[in-house]
Amino acid sequence: MPLQKNQIIPLAIDSLSSDGSGVGRWQGEAVFVPGAVPGDRLQVRIVKSCKRYAFGRIEQADERGPAYLAPDCPVFAPCGGCCFRHLRYADELAAKQGFVADAFRRLGGLELPVRPILPSPQTDRYRNKVQLPVQAGLDGRPRVGFYAGRSHRLVPCEDCLLQPQLLSQIAAAACAQMARLGISAYDEASHTGLVRHLLLRQGAHSGQVLLCLVVNGRSLPRAEEFCEAMQRRFPAIRSIQLNLNTARTNVILGPECVLLTGQPQIEDEMCGVPVALGPLSFYQVNTPAAEQLYEAARVAAALGPGESLLDLYCGMGTIGLAITGPDQPLVGVEVIGEAVGAARRSAAKMGRDNARFLCADAGQAAALLAKEGLRPKVVVLDPPRKGCEEQTLAAVAAMSPERVVMISCNPATAARDVRWLAGQGYRAEYVQPADLFPRTRHVEAIVRLQKDHL
Ligand code: SAH
Protein backbone atom coordinates (compact mmCIF):
# COMPACT_ATOMS: atom_id res chain seq x y z
CA MET A 1 0.00 0.00 0.00
CA PRO A 2 1.42 3.42 -0.86
CA LEU A 3 2.31 5.75 1.98
CA GLN A 4 -0.48 7.94 3.27
CA LYS A 5 -0.30 11.63 4.05
CA ASN A 6 0.36 12.23 7.79
CA GLN A 7 1.43 8.63 8.33
CA ILE A 8 4.47 8.43 10.63
CA ILE A 9 7.15 5.90 9.74
CA PRO A 10 10.59 4.99 11.09
CA LEU A 11 13.19 5.76 8.43
CA ALA A 12 16.94 5.20 8.05
CA ILE A 13 18.53 7.78 5.76
CA ASP A 14 21.16 6.39 3.40
CA SER A 15 21.90 9.09 0.81
CA LEU A 16 21.40 12.71 -0.23
CA SER A 17 19.38 13.82 -3.23
CA SER A 18 20.66 16.58 -5.49
CA ASP A 19 18.23 19.05 -3.91
CA GLY A 20 19.85 18.41 -0.53
CA SER A 21 17.19 16.17 1.02
CA GLY A 22 18.11 13.01 2.87
CA VAL A 23 16.76 9.88 1.18
CA GLY A 24 15.59 6.69 2.86
CA ARG A 25 13.65 3.67 1.62
CA TRP A 26 10.33 2.44 2.91
CA GLN A 27 9.29 -0.86 1.40
CA GLY A 28 11.17 -0.05 -1.77
CA GLU A 29 9.74 3.46 -2.01
CA ALA A 30 12.13 6.45 -1.82
CA VAL A 31 11.24 9.01 0.84
CA PHE A 32 12.82 12.48 0.60
CA VAL A 33 13.35 14.30 3.88
CA PRO A 34 14.73 17.87 4.04
CA GLY A 35 17.20 18.43 6.86
CA ALA A 36 18.19 14.77 7.09
CA VAL A 37 21.67 13.29 6.51
CA PRO A 38 22.94 9.78 5.77
CA GLY A 39 23.12 7.71 8.94
CA ASP A 40 20.10 9.42 10.51
CA ARG A 41 17.46 7.27 12.18
CA LEU A 42 14.24 9.23 12.21
CA GLN A 43 10.53 9.21 12.77
CA VAL A 44 9.20 10.83 9.62
CA ARG A 45 5.76 12.28 8.93
CA ILE A 46 4.68 11.87 5.31
CA VAL A 47 3.63 15.22 3.87
CA LYS A 48 3.11 14.17 0.27
CA SER A 49 2.86 10.77 -1.32
CA CYS A 50 3.32 10.14 -5.01
CA LYS A 51 3.22 6.80 -6.83
CA ARG A 52 6.78 5.60 -6.28
CA TYR A 53 8.18 8.13 -3.87
CA ALA A 54 7.12 10.39 -1.03
CA PHE A 55 8.16 13.50 0.84
CA GLY A 56 8.46 13.58 4.60
CA ARG A 57 9.21 15.86 7.48
CA ILE A 58 11.31 15.00 10.50
CA GLU A 59 8.96 14.32 13.41
CA GLN A 60 11.69 13.11 15.73
CA ALA A 61 15.39 12.33 15.32
CA ASP A 62 16.29 9.14 17.21
CA GLU A 63 19.88 9.20 16.04
CA ARG A 64 21.91 11.53 13.84
CA GLY A 65 24.47 10.49 11.22
CA PRO A 66 28.17 11.40 11.59
CA ALA A 67 27.94 14.28 9.07
CA TYR A 68 25.16 16.03 10.98
CA LEU A 69 25.74 19.54 12.25
CA ALA A 70 23.20 21.40 14.37
CA PRO A 71 22.00 24.22 12.07
CA ASP A 72 23.27 27.62 13.22
CA CYS A 73 20.40 29.59 11.69
CA PRO A 74 17.07 29.99 13.49
CA VAL A 75 15.11 30.06 10.22
CA PHE A 76 16.94 27.24 8.42
CA ALA A 77 13.84 25.09 7.99
CA PRO A 78 11.10 27.63 7.12
CA CYS A 79 13.30 29.83 4.92
CA GLY A 80 14.50 27.07 2.63
CA GLY A 81 17.21 29.19 1.01
CA CYS A 82 19.93 26.93 2.42
CA CYS A 83 19.59 23.18 2.15
CA PHE A 84 22.96 22.14 3.64
CA ARG A 85 23.18 24.09 6.87
CA HIS A 86 22.85 20.81 8.82
CA LEU A 87 25.82 19.10 7.17
CA ARG A 88 29.57 19.46 7.74
CA TYR A 89 31.11 21.43 4.90
CA ALA A 90 33.46 18.57 3.93
CA ASP A 91 30.40 16.34 3.50
CA GLU A 92 28.55 19.00 1.52
CA LEU A 93 31.53 19.15 -0.83
CA ALA A 94 31.60 15.37 -1.14
CA ALA A 95 27.88 15.36 -1.96
CA LYS A 96 28.30 18.04 -4.63
CA GLN A 97 31.27 16.17 -6.10
CA GLY A 98 28.95 13.17 -6.33
CA PHE A 99 26.12 15.15 -8.02
CA VAL A 100 28.52 16.31 -10.73
CA ALA A 101 30.07 12.87 -11.27
CA ASP A 102 26.61 11.34 -11.40
CA ALA A 103 25.29 13.82 -13.96
CA PHE A 104 28.14 13.12 -16.35
CA ARG A 105 28.02 9.36 -15.88
CA ARG A 106 24.27 8.82 -15.91
CA LEU A 107 22.94 11.66 -18.04
CA GLY A 108 25.95 12.22 -20.27
CA GLY A 109 26.99 8.58 -20.50
CA LEU A 110 30.53 9.89 -20.16
CA GLU A 111 33.37 8.35 -18.19
CA LEU A 112 35.75 11.18 -17.49
CA PRO A 113 37.90 12.15 -14.56
CA VAL A 114 36.13 14.37 -12.05
CA ARG A 115 38.72 16.51 -10.28
CA PRO A 116 38.34 17.28 -6.57
CA ILE A 117 35.82 20.09 -6.12
CA LEU A 118 37.19 23.57 -5.41
CA PRO A 119 35.81 24.64 -2.03
CA SER A 120 34.55 28.19 -1.58
CA PRO A 121 37.08 30.35 0.31
CA GLN A 122 34.21 31.51 2.54
CA THR A 123 31.25 29.34 3.51
CA ASP A 124 29.28 32.09 5.24
CA ARG A 125 28.60 35.72 4.35
CA TYR A 126 29.92 35.24 0.84
CA ARG A 127 27.11 36.86 -1.15
CA ASN A 128 27.86 40.24 -2.71
CA LYS A 129 24.18 40.75 -3.62
CA VAL A 130 20.98 40.26 -1.65
CA GLN A 131 17.33 40.82 -2.51
CA LEU A 132 15.07 41.03 0.50
CA PRO A 133 11.27 41.15 0.35
CA VAL A 134 9.76 43.89 2.52
CA GLN A 135 6.43 43.46 4.30
CA ALA A 136 4.69 45.21 7.18
CA GLY A 137 4.80 43.29 10.44
CA LEU A 138 1.80 43.05 12.77
CA ASP A 139 2.83 46.39 14.30
CA GLY A 140 2.70 47.92 10.83
CA ARG A 141 6.45 48.56 10.70
CA PRO A 142 8.28 47.43 7.56
CA ARG A 143 10.55 44.42 7.99
CA VAL A 144 12.64 42.19 5.76
CA GLY A 145 12.97 38.44 5.52
CA PHE A 146 12.72 35.67 2.98
CA TYR A 147 9.80 33.98 1.35
CA ALA A 148 9.22 30.48 2.67
CA GLY A 149 9.79 27.88 -0.06
CA ARG A 150 7.24 28.02 -2.92
CA SER A 151 5.21 30.74 -1.17
CA HIS A 152 5.05 34.46 -0.53
CA ARG A 153 4.80 34.07 3.22
CA LEU A 154 7.51 36.21 4.77
CA VAL A 155 9.86 34.49 7.19
CA PRO A 156 11.34 37.46 9.08
CA CYS A 157 15.12 37.27 9.13
CA GLU A 158 17.31 40.14 10.22
CA ASP A 159 20.65 38.56 9.57
CA CYS A 160 21.01 35.89 6.91
CA LEU A 161 24.32 34.08 7.39
CA LEU A 162 24.96 34.05 3.64
CA GLN A 163 25.15 37.84 3.45
CA PRO A 164 27.70 40.32 4.80
CA GLN A 165 26.71 41.62 8.22
CA LEU A 166 26.96 45.18 6.95
CA LEU A 167 24.19 44.48 4.43
CA SER A 168 21.97 43.11 7.22
CA GLN A 169 22.60 46.27 9.25
CA ILE A 170 21.82 48.49 6.28
CA ALA A 171 18.58 46.61 5.57
CA ALA A 172 17.49 46.93 9.21
CA ALA A 173 18.34 50.65 9.23
CA ALA A 174 16.46 51.18 5.97
CA CYS A 175 13.35 49.59 7.53
CA ALA A 176 13.73 51.80 10.61
CA GLN A 177 14.01 54.91 8.42
CA MET A 178 10.96 53.85 6.42
CA ALA A 179 8.99 53.57 9.68
CA ARG A 180 10.26 56.97 10.88
CA LEU A 181 9.45 58.71 7.61
CA GLY A 182 6.11 57.00 7.00
CA ILE A 183 7.28 55.12 3.90
CA SER A 184 5.04 52.10 3.57
CA ALA A 185 5.82 48.48 2.75
CA TYR A 186 4.12 46.93 -0.26
CA ASP A 187 1.19 44.59 0.24
CA GLU A 188 0.96 42.00 -2.46
CA ALA A 189 -2.66 40.98 -1.91
CA SER A 190 -4.09 44.49 -2.27
CA HIS A 191 -1.32 45.78 -4.58
CA THR A 192 -0.93 48.84 -2.35
CA GLY A 193 1.96 50.27 -0.37
CA LEU A 194 5.33 51.27 -1.72
CA VAL A 195 8.50 49.32 -0.99
CA ARG A 196 8.51 45.76 -2.35
CA HIS A 197 12.12 44.68 -2.01
CA LEU A 198 15.48 45.97 -0.90
CA LEU A 199 18.33 45.10 -3.22
CA LEU A 200 21.84 45.51 -1.83
CA ARG A 201 25.20 44.96 -3.43
CA GLN A 202 28.65 45.26 -1.96
CA GLY A 203 31.85 45.10 -3.99
CA ALA A 204 33.95 42.33 -2.41
CA HIS A 205 37.18 44.18 -3.15
CA SER A 206 36.04 47.81 -3.06
CA GLY A 207 33.64 47.54 -0.12
CA GLN A 208 31.33 50.02 -1.91
CA VAL A 209 27.62 49.50 -1.30
CA LEU A 210 24.61 50.09 -3.54
CA LEU A 211 21.16 50.31 -1.95
CA CYS A 212 18.15 50.00 -4.20
CA LEU A 213 14.52 50.17 -3.11
CA VAL A 214 12.17 48.37 -5.46
CA VAL A 215 9.00 50.44 -5.37
CA ASN A 216 5.41 50.19 -6.50
CA GLY A 217 5.47 53.80 -7.67
CA ARG A 218 7.72 56.36 -9.29
CA SER A 219 9.18 58.22 -6.33
CA LEU A 220 10.02 57.97 -2.64
CA PRO A 221 8.40 60.38 -0.17
CA ARG A 222 10.96 62.26 1.94
CA ALA A 223 13.70 60.76 -0.20
CA GLU A 224 16.29 63.35 0.83
CA GLU A 225 15.84 62.67 4.52
CA PHE A 226 16.00 58.93 3.88
CA CYS A 227 19.22 59.16 1.87
CA GLU A 228 20.85 61.59 4.25
CA ALA A 229 20.17 59.38 7.28
CA MET A 230 21.41 56.23 5.53
CA GLN A 231 24.58 57.80 4.16
CA ARG A 232 25.43 59.48 7.44
CA ARG A 233 25.31 56.16 9.27
CA PHE A 234 26.89 54.04 6.49
CA PRO A 235 29.65 55.83 4.58
CA ALA A 236 30.18 52.69 2.45
CA ILE A 237 26.89 53.48 0.65
CA ARG A 238 27.88 55.05 -2.66
CA SER A 239 24.58 54.79 -4.47
CA ILE A 240 20.91 54.89 -3.46
CA GLN A 241 18.40 54.18 -6.19
CA LEU A 242 14.83 53.26 -6.85
CA ASN A 243 13.83 50.48 -9.15
CA LEU A 244 10.33 51.06 -10.48
CA ASN A 245 8.07 48.03 -10.50
CA THR A 246 4.37 48.87 -10.48
CA ALA A 247 3.21 45.61 -12.06
CA ARG A 248 1.29 42.88 -10.28
CA THR A 249 4.02 40.32 -10.73
CA ASN A 250 6.37 37.89 -9.04
CA VAL A 251 9.28 39.34 -10.98
CA ILE A 252 11.34 41.30 -8.48
CA LEU A 253 12.82 44.05 -10.63
CA GLY A 254 11.27 46.40 -13.14
CA PRO A 255 13.20 47.69 -16.16
CA GLU A 256 13.72 51.29 -14.95
CA CYS A 257 15.96 52.69 -12.21
CA VAL A 258 16.01 56.22 -10.76
CA LEU A 259 19.10 57.53 -8.99
CA LEU A 260 18.34 59.22 -5.65
CA THR A 261 21.88 60.01 -4.58
CA GLY A 262 25.50 59.11 -5.34
CA GLN A 263 26.80 57.27 -8.39
CA PRO A 264 24.60 55.22 -10.73
CA GLN A 265 27.04 52.33 -10.30
CA ILE A 266 29.45 51.05 -7.69
CA GLU A 267 32.89 49.81 -8.62
CA ASP A 268 34.53 46.49 -7.98
CA GLU A 269 36.89 44.10 -9.69
CA MET A 270 37.01 40.43 -10.57
CA CYS A 271 40.40 38.80 -11.25
CA GLY A 272 41.78 42.28 -11.83
CA VAL A 273 39.04 43.22 -14.33
CA PRO A 274 37.44 46.52 -13.28
CA VAL A 275 33.64 46.35 -13.20
CA ALA A 276 30.86 48.87 -12.57
CA LEU A 277 27.70 47.44 -11.02
CA GLY A 278 24.18 48.83 -11.20
CA PRO A 279 21.05 47.26 -9.73
CA LEU A 280 20.32 45.24 -12.87
CA SER A 281 23.80 43.90 -13.68
CA PHE A 282 24.38 40.16 -13.72
CA TYR A 283 27.44 39.51 -11.58
CA GLN A 284 28.74 36.34 -9.93
CA VAL A 285 27.50 36.51 -6.34
CA ASN A 286 30.47 34.89 -4.59
CA THR A 287 33.47 36.92 -5.72
CA PRO A 288 36.39 34.94 -4.20
CA ALA A 289 34.94 31.62 -5.36
CA ALA A 290 34.21 33.03 -8.84
CA GLU A 291 37.81 34.19 -9.04
CA GLN A 292 38.92 30.61 -8.38
CA LEU A 293 36.50 29.42 -11.05
CA TYR A 294 37.91 31.89 -13.57
CA GLU A 295 41.44 30.75 -12.71
CA ALA A 296 40.38 27.14 -13.39
CA ALA A 297 38.86 28.33 -16.69
CA ARG A 298 42.14 30.04 -17.58
CA VAL A 299 44.05 26.81 -16.95
CA ALA A 300 41.51 24.80 -18.97
CA ALA A 301 41.65 27.25 -21.89
CA ALA A 302 45.47 27.06 -21.95
CA LEU A 303 45.76 29.90 -24.45
CA GLY A 304 49.21 30.41 -25.92
CA PRO A 305 50.74 33.77 -26.91
CA GLY A 306 48.67 35.50 -29.59
CA GLU A 307 45.90 32.87 -29.54
CA SER A 308 42.28 34.04 -29.64
CA LEU A 309 39.20 33.39 -27.53
CA LEU A 310 35.44 33.48 -28.19
CA ASP A 311 33.47 33.96 -24.95
CA LEU A 312 29.82 33.01 -25.50
CA TYR A 313 27.21 34.04 -22.87
CA CYS A 314 29.82 36.48 -21.60
CA GLY A 315 27.70 38.63 -19.25
CA MET A 316 29.83 41.65 -18.37
CA GLY A 317 32.77 40.08 -20.16
CA THR A 318 34.65 39.25 -16.98
CA ILE A 319 35.78 35.71 -17.87
CA GLY A 320 37.14 36.61 -21.28
CA LEU A 321 38.86 39.76 -20.06
CA ALA A 322 40.34 37.88 -17.09
CA ILE A 323 41.81 34.97 -19.02
CA THR A 324 43.17 36.73 -22.10
CA GLY A 325 46.07 39.15 -22.23
CA PRO A 326 46.70 42.25 -24.36
CA ASP A 327 48.07 40.08 -27.20
CA GLN A 328 45.18 37.58 -27.21
CA PRO A 329 42.19 38.72 -29.31
CA LEU A 330 38.81 38.35 -27.61
CA VAL A 331 35.23 38.32 -28.90
CA GLY A 332 32.41 38.19 -26.35
CA VAL A 333 28.70 37.59 -27.05
CA GLU A 334 25.86 38.42 -24.68
CA VAL A 335 22.15 39.03 -25.18
CA ILE A 336 21.60 41.72 -22.50
CA GLY A 337 22.55 45.14 -23.87
CA GLU A 338 23.41 46.64 -20.49
CA ALA A 339 25.91 43.87 -19.78
CA VAL A 340 27.51 44.33 -23.20
CA GLY A 341 27.92 48.06 -22.47
CA ALA A 342 29.58 47.19 -19.15
CA ALA A 343 31.93 44.72 -20.88
CA ARG A 344 32.97 47.39 -23.40
CA ARG A 345 33.65 49.89 -20.63
CA SER A 346 35.78 47.39 -18.70
CA ALA A 347 37.74 46.57 -21.86
CA ALA A 348 38.30 50.27 -22.54
CA LYS A 349 39.52 50.86 -18.98
CA MET A 350 41.99 48.02 -19.43
CA GLY A 351 43.18 49.44 -22.76
CA ARG A 352 42.06 46.24 -24.47
CA ASP A 353 41.52 47.40 -28.03
CA ASN A 354 41.73 43.79 -29.22
CA ALA A 355 38.52 42.90 -27.36
CA ARG A 356 35.08 43.34 -28.91
CA PHE A 357 31.64 42.53 -27.59
CA LEU A 358 28.48 41.77 -29.53
CA CYS A 359 24.96 42.09 -28.25
CA ALA A 360 23.23 39.09 -29.79
CA ASP A 361 21.89 35.61 -29.25
CA ALA A 362 24.87 33.30 -28.73
CA GLY A 363 23.77 30.81 -31.38
CA GLN A 364 22.99 33.39 -34.06
CA ALA A 365 26.20 35.31 -33.39
CA ALA A 366 28.30 32.15 -33.39
CA ALA A 367 26.80 31.06 -36.73
CA LEU A 368 27.48 34.50 -38.22
CA LEU A 369 31.02 34.66 -36.86
CA ALA A 370 31.71 31.15 -38.20
CA LYS A 371 30.49 32.24 -41.64
CA GLU A 372 32.66 35.35 -41.49
CA GLY A 373 35.64 33.06 -40.96
CA LEU A 374 36.30 33.58 -37.24
CA ARG A 375 38.45 30.68 -36.07
CA PRO A 376 39.14 31.15 -32.34
CA LYS A 377 41.68 28.85 -30.75
CA VAL A 378 39.39 28.36 -27.75
CA VAL A 379 35.67 28.86 -27.13
CA VAL A 380 34.28 29.43 -23.64
CA LEU A 381 30.60 28.57 -23.12
CA ASP A 382 28.91 29.76 -19.92
CA PRO A 383 25.18 29.34 -20.59
CA PRO A 384 22.26 29.82 -18.18
CA ARG A 385 20.76 26.78 -16.43
CA LYS A 386 18.93 25.48 -19.48
CA GLY A 387 22.24 24.96 -21.28
CA CYS A 388 23.12 25.64 -24.92
CA GLU A 389 20.89 25.32 -27.92
CA GLU A 390 21.97 22.81 -30.53
CA GLN A 391 22.39 25.60 -33.07
CA THR A 392 24.96 27.22 -30.78
CA LEU A 393 26.92 24.00 -30.32
CA ALA A 394 26.80 23.33 -34.07
CA ALA A 395 28.16 26.82 -34.80
CA VAL A 396 30.94 26.28 -32.27
CA ALA A 397 31.89 22.97 -33.86
CA ALA A 398 31.86 24.66 -37.30
CA MET A 399 34.57 27.06 -36.07
CA SER A 400 36.68 24.04 -35.22
CA PRO A 401 38.42 25.47 -32.14
CA GLU A 402 41.23 23.49 -30.56
CA ARG A 403 39.47 23.49 -27.19
CA VAL A 404 36.05 24.24 -25.74
CA VAL A 405 35.73 25.22 -22.09
CA MET A 406 32.21 24.65 -20.85
CA ILE A 407 31.26 26.39 -17.62
CA SER A 408 27.91 25.50 -16.16
CA CYS A 409 25.75 25.99 -13.11
CA ASN A 410 23.68 22.96 -14.09
CA PRO A 411 25.62 19.69 -14.41
CA ALA A 412 22.63 17.96 -16.05
CA THR A 413 22.44 20.26 -19.08
CA ALA A 414 26.24 20.51 -19.21
CA ALA A 415 26.45 16.71 -19.47
CA ARG A 416 23.91 16.76 -22.30
CA ASP A 417 25.79 19.49 -24.19
CA VAL A 418 29.19 17.86 -23.64
CA ARG A 419 27.80 14.63 -25.01
CA TRP A 420 26.56 16.45 -28.10
CA LEU A 421 30.00 17.99 -28.66
CA ALA A 422 31.58 14.54 -28.18
CA GLY A 423 29.59 13.45 -31.25
CA GLN A 424 31.30 16.28 -33.19
CA GLY A 425 34.82 15.11 -32.35
CA TYR A 426 35.37 16.91 -29.04
CA ARG A 427 36.76 14.68 -26.31
CA ALA A 428 35.88 15.70 -22.77
CA GLU A 429 39.15 15.54 -20.84
CA TYR A 430 38.03 16.31 -17.32
CA VAL A 431 35.39 17.96 -15.17
CA GLN A 432 36.35 20.47 -12.50
CA PRO A 433 33.50 21.06 -10.03
CA ALA A 434 33.56 24.25 -7.97
CA ASP A 435 31.45 25.32 -5.03
CA LEU A 436 30.23 28.87 -5.59
CA PHE A 437 27.16 28.57 -3.40
CA PRO A 438 27.99 26.93 -0.05
CA ARG A 439 24.97 25.74 1.97
CA THR A 440 22.73 25.76 -1.10
CA ARG A 441 22.13 22.93 -3.56
CA HIS A 442 23.85 24.71 -6.43
CA VAL A 443 27.16 23.56 -7.86
CA GLU A 444 29.23 24.81 -10.75
CA ALA A 445 31.38 22.74 -13.11
CA ILE A 446 33.99 23.37 -15.78
CA VAL A 447 34.59 20.82 -18.53
CA ARG A 448 37.58 20.90 -20.82
CA LEU A 449 36.97 19.50 -24.30
CA GLN A 450 39.79 18.92 -26.72
CA LYS A 451 39.42 18.52 -30.46
CA ASP A 452 40.33 15.01 -31.57
CA HIS A 453 42.84 15.00 -34.42
CA LEU A 454 41.97 11.73 -36.09
N1 SAH B 1 30.04 34.52 -18.18
C1 SAH B 1 29.37 35.47 -17.35
C2 SAH B 1 27.83 35.28 -17.28
C3 SAH B 1 27.30 33.89 -17.22
S1 SAH B 1 25.58 33.78 -16.88
C4 SAH B 1 29.98 35.53 -15.96
O1 SAH B 1 30.79 34.71 -15.61
O2 SAH B 1 29.63 36.43 -15.20
C5 SAH B 1 24.86 33.48 -18.43
C6 SAH B 1 24.72 34.70 -19.30
O3 SAH B 1 24.13 34.30 -20.54
C7 SAH B 1 23.81 35.80 -18.74
O4 SAH B 1 24.51 37.01 -18.75
C8 SAH B 1 22.63 35.84 -19.75
O5 SAH B 1 22.14 37.16 -19.95
C9 SAH B 1 23.27 35.32 -21.00
N2 SAH B 1 22.38 34.71 -21.99
C10 SAH B 1 21.26 33.98 -21.77
N3 SAH B 1 20.75 33.51 -22.93
C11 SAH B 1 21.55 33.97 -23.93
C12 SAH B 1 21.54 33.81 -25.35
N4 SAH B 1 20.62 33.10 -25.96
N5 SAH B 1 22.54 34.39 -26.04
C13 SAH B 1 23.51 35.10 -25.42
N6 SAH B 1 23.57 35.27 -24.09
C14 SAH B 1 22.60 34.72 -23.34
Image: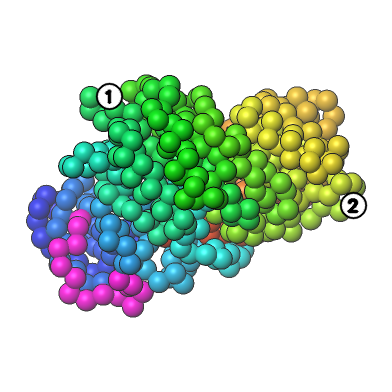
Could you tell me how far apart the alpha carbons at marks 2 and 1 are, in whole angstroms? Answer: 58 Å
- Amino acid under disc 1: His
Residue under the image location 30 percent in, 75 percent down: 65
x then y, percent, for residue 11: 19, 67
Question: On the rendered structure, is 50 left or right of 438?
Answer: left
Question: Which labelled disc corresponds to residue 241?
Answer: none
Q: Secondary structure at mark 2?
A: loop
Q: Amino acid at mark 2?
A: Pro
Q: Secondary structure at mark 1?
A: loop
Instruction: Report the residue at 72% width, 48% height from top.
Output: 273
Q: Mark 2 near mark 1, Cβ–Cβ under 8 Å?
A: no
Image location of residue 178, percent across then percent down: 34, 38
Magenta segment range? Answer: 56-70
Q: Residue at x 57, y 43 (%)?
A: 238
Q: Is residue 73 left or right of residue 388?
A: left
When the figure is inspected, residue 144 is found, relative to residue 45, above or below; the finding is above
Q: Which residue is mark 2?
A: 305
